[in-house]
Image (cartoon, rainbow, N blue to C red):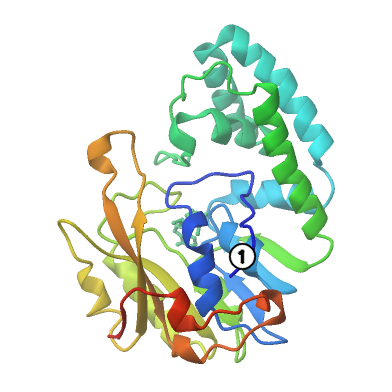
């Protein structure tokens, strides 16, 4: 169990904030393990759980660029405060028109601060690009979005990154999952959270059966331990790939309320699954996680099965 989950400054659909604890409890980290996270998204999982050495990657270059700018001290919390206060005041005055002005500016210049502004003022904190790789999420219609308290919240999230980056040897890189997985070796740990197969997908890249199989092949060929997040089932459907593509893995699951889209009908309770190539009851207690006192069985009162 980790005491408090740190929420990063970037939001994304499918963010795993609510299952960081579950992942923490069943990840396999030893003293010299390097963490590999090829589908970083907001980074919430690794930013909370990765040991000293880690590689975070994603095909979307913009969160990577923002985190690298913070790591390289090109952007800090003070700069973020000044930027959001300044641009936020214009948004409050000009509303929608200014959101689309920043969106056009971002699509031309790719400034990480504009990306942060858009991510925190767009509809539902989504990240979505059209086929020309232009950010195309509409306005969230909150002209007062960057009020003082909200700016302070984001500034504190950036401040936290400023504190933890120098303490760790963490790399942020824009590349495909194949490239990242190929770097992991024996004793390393790979946490994968790809776009969910067979479900609504709006990421920088698309995701289909071919990708799912390529991911399975890359992970099965690796000597590292891996954990994969996927969906298990909801009221209407079951993820058939678990029993076929991922046959032979261990599985843990937990109910999770999944938010995509604004309509109530899109907010179905969905069972998340974690698939692993090791028995999660055998994980060592890592120093990063040493406050863990309850047994695995106490913490996970959900189903557990070997597929
Ligand atoms: C479900 S999101 C990850 C969410 C993340 N775990 C979190 O909690 O914030 C999936 C991510 O995979 C990335 N992605 C999609 N296709 C990819 C590929 N072929 N290689 C690497 N990353 C990819 C997307 O850009 C997106 O950030």
Residue placed most toward the observer, 81 or 301: 301
Q: Secondary structure at mark 1?
A: helix
Q: Quadrant of residue 169?
A: bottom right
- Please name the residue that numbered disc 1 is placed on: 46
Q: Residue drawn 39% across and 82% down?
A: 217
Q: Residue drawn 73% across and 66% down?
A: 170
Q: Residue furthest left?
A: 236
- Does residue 134 appear in the picture of this structure? no
Is 85 left, or right, of 253 in this rendering?
A: right
- Does residue 283 appear in the picture of this structure? yes
Q: Could you tell me how many numbered marks the image carries?
A: 1
Q: Residue drawn 17% across and 60% down?
A: 237
Q: Residue 206: percent from the left, percent from the top? A: 36, 54
Q: Residue drawn 75% across and 27% down?
A: 83
Is 305 left, or right, of 38 in this rendering?
A: left
176, above or below 249, in the image: above
Q: Residue 203: percent from the left, percent from the top? A: 42, 49
Q: Residue 207: percent from the left, percent from the top? A: 34, 59
Q: Residue 307: percent from the left, percent from the top? A: 27, 85
228, above or below 203, in the image: below
75, above or below 284, in the image: above
Crowding at mark 1 (Cα within 10 Å: few <14, some 14-19, many 20+): many
Q: Quadrant of residue 82?
A: top right
Q: Quadrant of residue 5?
A: bottom right
Which quarter of the image is occupied by the N terminus?
Answer: bottom right
State whether label 1 is within 8 Å of ligand 1. Answer: no
């Amino acid at each position: 169990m980790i005491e408090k989950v740190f929420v990063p400054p970037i939001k994304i659909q499918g963010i795993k904030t609510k299952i960081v604890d579950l992942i923490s409890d069943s990840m396999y980290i030893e003293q010299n393990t390097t963490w590999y996270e090829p589908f970083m998204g907001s980074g919430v999982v690794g930013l909370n759980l990765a040991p000293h050495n880690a590689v975070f990657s994603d095909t979307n270059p913009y969160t990577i660029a923002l985190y690298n700018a913070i790591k390289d001290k090109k952007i800090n919390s003070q700069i973020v405060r000044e930027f959001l206060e300044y641009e936020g005041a214009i948004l409050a005055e000009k509303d929608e028109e200014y959101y689309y002005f920043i969106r056009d500016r971002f699509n031309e210049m790719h400034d990480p601060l504009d990306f942060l502004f858009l991510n925190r003022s767009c509809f539902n904190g989504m990240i979505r690009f059209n086929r020309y790789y232009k950010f195309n999420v509409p306005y969230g219609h909150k002209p007062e979005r960057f009020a003082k308290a909200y700016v302070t919240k984001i500034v504190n999230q950036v401040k936290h990154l400023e504190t933890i980056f120098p303490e760790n040897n963490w790399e942020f890189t824009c590349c495909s999952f194949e490239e990242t997985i190929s770097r992991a070796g024996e004793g390393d740990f790979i946490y994968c959270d790809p776009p969910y197969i067979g479900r609504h997908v709006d990421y920088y890249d698309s995701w289909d059966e071919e990708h799912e199989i390529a991911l399975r092949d890359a992970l099965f060929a690796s000597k590292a331990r891996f954990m994969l997040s996927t969906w298990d089932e909801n009221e209407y459907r079951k993820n058939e790939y678990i029993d076929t593509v991922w046959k032979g893995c261990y599985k843990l699951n937990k109910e999770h309320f999944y938010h995509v889209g604004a309509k109530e009908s899109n907010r179905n309770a969905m069972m998340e699954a974690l698939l692993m190539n090791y028995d999660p009851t055998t994980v060592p207690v890592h120093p990063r996680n040493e406050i863990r006192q309850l047994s695995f069985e106490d913490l996970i009162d959900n189903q557990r099965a070997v597929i």
